[in-house]
Image (cartoon, rainbow, N blue to C red):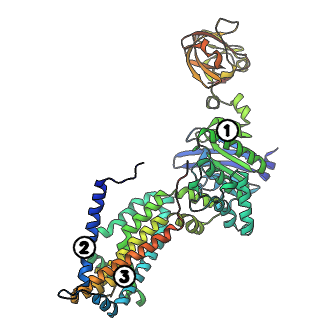
Amino acid sequence: MNKRLSLFNWGIIALAALFFFVPLAVTGVFSLWQGGSRYGFSAYFLLLNTSGFWASLWLSFRLAVETILLSFFLLVPSMIFVHLKAQWLKPLFEFISNLPFVIPAIALIDGLTTLYTGPAWLISTPNYLVIPYVFLALPYAYRSIDVGLTTLDVKTLTEAGQSLGAGWGRIIFWVLLPNMKAALIGATLLTLTIVMGEFTFASVLLFHTFAVFINDTGQNAITEAAALSLFSFLITWLFMLGVLITGRRNPANLGGAH
Amino acid sequence: MDGTQIAMSGVSLKNIRKSYGERVVLADVNMELAQGELLCLLGPSGCGKTTLLRILAGFETASAGKIVLNGTDVTRLPPNKRRMGMVFQAYSLFPNMTALQNVRFGPRVRGVGNTASQLAEAERLLGMVGLASHTQKFPHQLSGGQQQRVALARALAVKPDILLLDEPLSALDAKVRTQLRSEIRRIQKETGITTVFVTHDQEEALSISDRVAVMNEGHVLQIAAPATIYQEPANAFVARFIGAGGVLQGRTEGQAVRAGSVLLPANAAAALPLGTDVELFLRPEHVTLHVTDSAGAVRAEVSEQTFFGSLTRIKLSLSDVPQGEIWADISSDRAAHFAPGAPVWASWAPESPRVLAR
């Protein structure tokens, strides 16, 4: 098979790269502007020393991890169950997973605050955000995991595991999850990105997440806001890269050599 | 061997019934397997053979009936509590594990021995299936035949009381299939594990098993040794399903069957009352062809030739018999004498045909 790219292909790639990198480069240049014709890193130094920067970043990251864990805890076993035992429930799952697309965020917040009461550690702390975040990330996490389960012969692998004496725990953790690595990484990355950038829920519920911090900073110091945007972009990318590299260490390929 | 002995040392299925609503998939199946026996469940698609195997494995629950394994009722036991090894039609190896890790999986989850003994046993089994040099390969690095060998080794690693094989060769090409078939039989004999082998391929069933159970529409029609199934089919379905053969319809008339104006020699017809509507089954290897008229031969016309290498199968329509056809296997060297459309004379020994009432 000829794998060489034609001039046209290279042209398309160059256009896509321009579309992607030009705004980043311009934001980068703007973040270095110090007034007049002076350029430097003062915005970055200022940013790193601003109170609330590290706290908001850590908070968003922690919420992202909690959201990912809760999403997996809820979705993985239930979706395995649907794939194995209750295919007829799949349309219902599809419907529910698409609800976040049609329910406005503000309506969701209103509904959640009315619906959920509970212990102070949940309701009056940022942990409360995990609930709407799971809902917000649901379409993406669901789709990723669903693709992972569909490409895997879950039924045969489960039955093979059972016939060898394995219970559900071992089948899920030793057999199914390792073979859904790509799907889980996809769901992780998407959820992480969504949570790191989520503004509406946090702002309305008065929690100081990283996205709220970026917005607040942008109100007063626009070069710092540009620097902050680049910084958040960079850490999201670094995290994605880390997860991808980890995921590639032990590739689980499906199919056979014939 | 009587039934009690079999139940104590093998497998006993008693009145197994499975239905989905109104649809009955298995209708009161009774079966006894002796220790070390290889039984093939043979039948067309949808006959219930895989459902029966899955009930044995515990993946499906019987609507009624009882499964006794080595004297213990296992009907309600979940699959992971039954001591059964299973090889699936689809390659079922765990893609994230090497061949060695796949084979070690069973002993590991069952906590049999320590790591060293589990690995040693897994290596021994992979050696037994001819994959000693492939232990560190992942499933995607193995061919289909090699994957099924690993699956077989993996099923044997848990030292099962019974080995269940669900059409394990059907996804393989013809050559690998024949080779692996012989190896499965060799290993089964070596290990002495009671085995149930599901297939829809009659040649596979006849060549590999101690006994064959022919199934259709949820019923077991006949359980017998391969030779008996082939030579003495219990009914018309078994006769048609097993092996190629001609079928002619007629009425008994002493030691013959009258079909149209022709009297077809068949000693078995004498066992039925005169004038009974019957079907006469004739295997192609029992039919002899002549280019000229011969005593006791029936006039026919060649309607088709199929070349099988050393043999050529000739399809014949009998000139004075309105319904049915017969087949004859001849050496391919002689096939030129029997071109399509040529008149021939067919004869057979009177004891060869099987005669069954319609």
> CB under 8 Å between callouts 3 and 1?
no
Q: Residue A232: where, in percent of width, then height? A: 34, 80
Q: Amino acid at mark 1?
A: Ala
Viewer-nearest of discs 2 and 1: 2
- Cα separation, mark 3 vs mark 1, equals 62 Å
Picture quadrant of residue A42: bottom left
Badge 1: residue crowd in 10 Å (few <14, some 14–19, many ≥20): many
Q: Say which residue label 1 marks.
A: B205
Q: Amino acid at mark 2?
A: Pro
Residue sitting at x 59%, y 48%: B144
Label 2 SS: helix
- Give the tally of numbered discs: 3
Residue A86 seen anywhere in this rendered image of the structure = no
Depth order, front residue of A184/A43? A43
Q: Are marks 2 and 3 on the same chain?
A: yes
Q: Are marks 2 and 1 on the same chain?
A: no
Say which chain tag 3 marks: A
Depth order, front residue of B125/A227? A227
Q: Is residue B240 above or below residue B91?
A: above
Badge 3: residue crowd in 10 Å (few <14, some 14–19, many ≥20): many
Badge 2: residue crowd in 10 Å (few <14, some 14–19, many ≥20): few
Q: Are marks 3 and 1 on the same chain?
A: no
Q: Residue A223: where, in percent of width, then height? A: 24, 85
Q: Amino acid at mark 3?
A: Leu
Q: Say which residue label 3 marks.
A: A129
- Cα separation, mark 2 vs mark 1, equals 69 Å
